[in-house]
Amino acid sequence: MKQRYWILATLLSHWRWHPSQLATVVTGLAVATALWCGVQAINTHARASYDRAASIFGGPRPATLISNDGPTFAQDLYIKLRRAGWKVSPVLEGRVVIGARPFQIVGIDIVTLPQHAGFSSVRQGDAGLAQFLTPPWQTLAAAETLKALGAAPGARLVTDRGRTLAPLVAASELAPDTLIVDIGVAQDLLDAPGRVSRLIMSPGAEIAAPPLATIVGDQLRLVAPDDESDLARLTDSFHLNLTAFGFLAFIVGLFIVHSAIGLAFEQRLGMMRTVRALGVSSRTLTAMLLVELMSFSIFAGAVGVVCGYLIASALLPDVAASLEGLYGARVAGALTLDGAWWLSGLGMAVLGALAAAGGSLLKVYRLPLLESAQPYAWQDAQRRWLRRQGLVALLCLASAVGAYVLGSGLIAGFAMMAGLLLCAALGLPIVLSAFLRLGEQRSREPLAKWFWADSRQQLSGLSLALMALLLALAANIGVGTMVEGFRKTFTSWLDRRLVAEVYFDAKSNEQARPILRWLEARGEVDAILPVWRAETRIAGWPTDVFGSRDHETYRRNWELISALPDAWDRVRAGDAALISEQTARRLGADVGSSVQIPVADTPWSVTVAGIYADYGNPKSQLRVDSEALLRHWPDVQRTNYALRIAPEKVAGLISAMRAELGGDINRLVDQANLKSMSKGIFEQTFAVTAALNTLTLGVAGIALFASLLTLSNLRLAQLAPVWAMGITRRRLAQIEIGKILLLTVFTAIAALPVGLAVAWCLVAVVNVAAFGWRLPLHLFPVQWVQLFGLALLTALVASLPPIIRLGRTTPAELIKVFVNER
């Protein structure tokens, strides 16, 4: 035990004399762990919010009965089922706006609600139950919801409909932005008297009771309790994308660790030779190195987990906004984490350290005692490893091709992208070495020959940092190309999609009629276009079926990816539909195919007359004639309309509608504001991606800085002879900067095709698998020039401290190089 203590103390003494290397190892591990843990914290927190929302009635999701005809149904059906012996409980759901922020209202019948459904705060004693069921009633809300409202328990707030909420009461088991009230109160708040959204079934609700169809016919259908949550299903691709970026940043961070540990082991060869000569076995020496590594990884992992928490807290608002804008998913604004997450972060740090140092530990274990005394034994092992690295790069390329040819889905897409990135990163040192050797062969001047030869010799120490830079640049080019292409495509698509000048949403079908009469009497509107929507499921996916009237607005502006020659005429006839690209991919449908739309009576068979792009929508979507929609969904909400009017009359019309019809209108917006809101959602969606890209490039810069700083101690042996032959220190400093910039430029050039390949993978494979639609691939040379400039600036900044240190090196220190035995 004492021997091991002294061995460990001897090994640790190296770091006392090289604190910059110790800082590099700790920083690399901490940064890698922080980015990975930050992304996982966001994903874990979001999924926990989904689970809270999905299990709002406690325990696993219960079986429910929902309407076949629309979002709500008459509560008479509930009464019939209860009288027939069915153990069901009614629920009404809807949204209200309080202080410009939307909240979900959930009305429940606490008396019939199953016991496993929670709400202990209401069930505790008769007093709590009475307060919930009698005036002034109660509104249950999570603590974060009360904080978002800026209200204390007992406060009464007013909704956008002019209704006053019952006094607020904190309830810990609720999801964020959700308000629970008695169902009678909810019907008043939502202007839905006598309506119910769904029925919660108690276990064994149908036992000893008549079959469902004999009581309510085909008006209701059963949703099994084990059906996958729509939110979890729709948001999986979003979280998988975040995980991929977090893992990429983790790998780039590990390059820092790998480079620093490799150089530290090389510098300690003499120390390890002495320890071995004193009788210490290679197994014991390797074990002590492993103990040293675990100590560093646990400390750095703890720092990384804390930093990851801070990163996640900073990015969470943008993630929450993206999830709500894209999927309607509510995520709590305050980050809450459990002990398992902290332990997993430390585990990733330990595994990362082992992965980064595994090769070096293996070399120490295998190097014979006498060979380790040779100055270039380590470099010989590295050259052999470089040849193996080339073979691994070819295997990675083969795996990428195999994933594309044989695989399908998101995992295959990310596997292909990972194979391409790893192949490029592993192949970079080989290509750089060949390029530098060619430069050496073409040179005639002695100093130029030394420049190329010394650059190739220095490549072994910089290769990992350059590989990290290549990965960061390629990821930035790929993701930047995808995002900018999406922005360009999305903007153009919005201009064609949102053509009408004004959009409004009435509060109910009854309140829509006087609005339409008022508009017709006013005579300013050129066309009133219905935009009605029914909800159903096709092939297990939630699907919106939109009904609209045939008009030149759609024929001129609605761009179809593929269509039958008479597509619009077929839709107007009522026996055909236009379907979104993601719907076509999910159903394997093409123009001319037949699609079955589930409705209340019998499936509605329509012909696919055309396929259109529907960017940003995770749901499936079909568009049919409005009259055909009414024939199959007679109770559909007929409240949404688009108005065509001369642009100069828009402001006057909106002002008049608000003044005279404000009480009947739920939402009124002009085209410019609607486009602005849509683009705002888009920007929030990719804010997290941009932040992770920036962090990844920053990590690559740290890797380059750490490598240069570590190598600066080893450079004197190569630079002193050149200085002794008459080259000034300033000239040497300029040459050193030139080497770094040359290698950075070549790395940036190599990153361009790799980045474009990543962009193609994202738009043609990952996007299609994740969302069901494919983006056109646009190229942005100006973005590449900016990124290359940033890469050069990063390399210049990273090289300055070692270069300044070289410039300040005294002649006496350079002469000492010749005194040492080498």
Image (cartoon, rainbow, N blue to C red):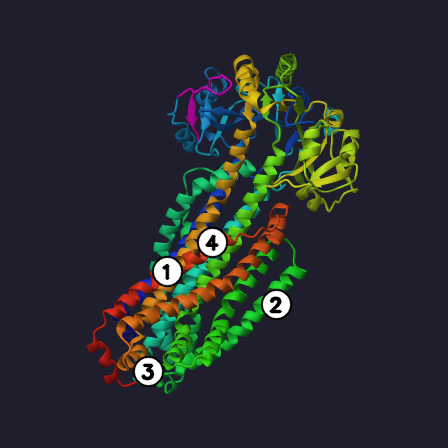
Give the mark nearer the N terminus: 2 vs 1: 2
x, y (%) of residue 224? 65, 38
Q: Which residue is mark 3?
A: 273
Residue 410 or residue 213, whichever sits in front: 410
Label 3, label 2: how many angstroms apart (C-alpha)? 41 Å
Label 2, label 4: how many angstroms apart (C-alpha)? 24 Å
Q: Amino acid at mark 4?
A: Gly
Q: Is residue 346 visible?
A: no
- In magenta, the rendered stretch is 155-171
Give the mark nearer the N terminus: 4 vs 1: 4
Question: What numbered label is drawn on residue 246?
Answer: 4
Residue 594: image quadrant is top right
Label 2 environment density (alpha carbons within 10 Å; few <14, some 14–19, many ≥20): some
x, y (%) of residue 370? 37, 87
Q: Which residue is mark 1?
A: 702
Residue 399 or residue 783, whichever sits in front: 783
Residue 737 or residue 699, whichever sits in front: 737
Q: Secondary structure at mark 2?
A: helix
